[in-house]
Image: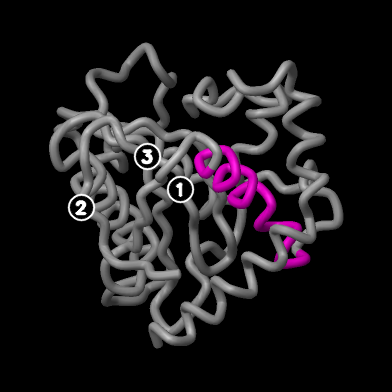
């Protein structure tokens, strides 16, 4: 499996991910996770001329204008993140990720009194080739906390869009691309949990790939 930088096209879906430099932790506590999620919501929209740090928390969709990209699902892990995105406008994903990464890095460096890059170079992206792959990647993203043994029940993990998909909490993800294929949130949950071993095998392959990347 190769993780070359994708050439982004409008209307296409991409699995986007990155990790901390030297595999360091990029999220230390609840405040960090919450800050990244709020920034994820904020910077997906175009024409945000005010930095998130000066804007404060948003009231979700009613303040958003046109989007750079639609967030389909996400998961934040202690030293990396996964996003499933659909590009909406030209250069949308690249601009979105640049704003998001720069904003969060400034916040993190200020809070922890450090300097320099926080994430490892450019983010990685893989284009989704089919509807089937789209659903499988979304499941894989939601399985990450279970795959890495952070929790025994992924309902207990607060830093992903999984609970949003189950209808347990509100959010900003465009779930219809996935949920249109399921009769209910319970049906999606069954689909995810029936494939734990599949997720673990994919994780091993991903780790091997990252080792090759250095």
Q: Residues within 10 Å of mark 2 (few under 14, many from 20)?
A: few
Q: Residue at x 49, y 54 (%)?
A: 82
Residue under numbered circle 1: 83
Residue 88: x %, y % from top left:
25, 29
Residue 32: x %, y % from top left:
51, 54
Which of the two discs, 2 and 1, labels the residue nearer the N terminus? 2
> From the image, which quarter does the N terminus lie in?
bottom left
> Is residue 10 positioned above or below 125 on the image?
above
Residue 143 lies in magenta, yes or no? yes
Residue 211: x %, y % from top left:
48, 86
Please tell me whether mark 2 or mark 1 is closer to you in this view. 2
Prevailing secondary structure of the magenta residues: helix
> Is residue 118 positioned above or below 15 on the image?
below
| Marking on residue 13 | 3
Residue 113 lies in magenta, yes or no? no
Residue under numbered circle 2: 7
**Distance between the Cα atoms at labels 3 and 2?**
11 Å
Q: Residue at x 65, y 29 (%)?
A: 165
- Classify residue 136 by image quadrant: top right
Residue range corresponding to the magenta coloring: 133-149
- Which of the pair 70/138 is nearer the observer? 138
> Is residue 173 positioned above or below 59 on the image?
below
Which of the two discs, 1 and 3, labels the residue nearer the N terminus? 3
- Which of the pair 106/191 is nearer the observer? 191
The answer to whether the residues at label 1 and label 3 have Cβ atoms under 8 Å apart is: no
Q: Secondary structure at mark 3?
A: strand
> Is residue 69 positioned above or below 96 on the image?
above
Which of the two discs, 3 and 2, labels the residue nearer the N terminus? 2
């Amino acid at each position: 499996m190769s993780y070359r930088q994708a050439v982004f096209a409008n209307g296409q879906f991409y699995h986007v991910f990155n990790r901390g430099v030297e595999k360091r932790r990029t999220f230390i506590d609840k405040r960090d996770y919450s800050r990244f999620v709020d920034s994820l919501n904020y910077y997906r929209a175009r024409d945000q001329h005010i930095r998130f740090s000066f804007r404060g928390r948003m009231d979700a969709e009613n303040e958003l204008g046109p989007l750079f990209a639609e967030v389909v699902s996400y998961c934040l892990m202690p030293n990396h993140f996964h996003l499933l995105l659909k590009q909406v406008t030209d250069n949308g994903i690249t601009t979105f990720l640049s704003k998001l990464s720069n904003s969060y890095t400034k916040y993190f460096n200020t809070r922890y009194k450090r300097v320099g890059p926080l994430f490892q170079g450019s983010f990685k992206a893989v284009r989704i080739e089919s509807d089937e792959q789209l659903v499988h990647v979304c499941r894989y993203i939601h399985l990450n906390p279970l795959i890495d043994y952070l929790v025994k029940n992924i309902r207990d993990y607060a830093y992903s869009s999984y609970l949003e998909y189950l209808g347990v909490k509100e959010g900003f993800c465009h779930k219809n691309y996935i949920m249109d294929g399921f009769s209910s949130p319970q049906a999606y949950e069954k689909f995810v949990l029936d494939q734990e071993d599949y997720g673990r095998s994919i994780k091993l392959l991903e780790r091997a790939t990252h080792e090759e990347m250095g």
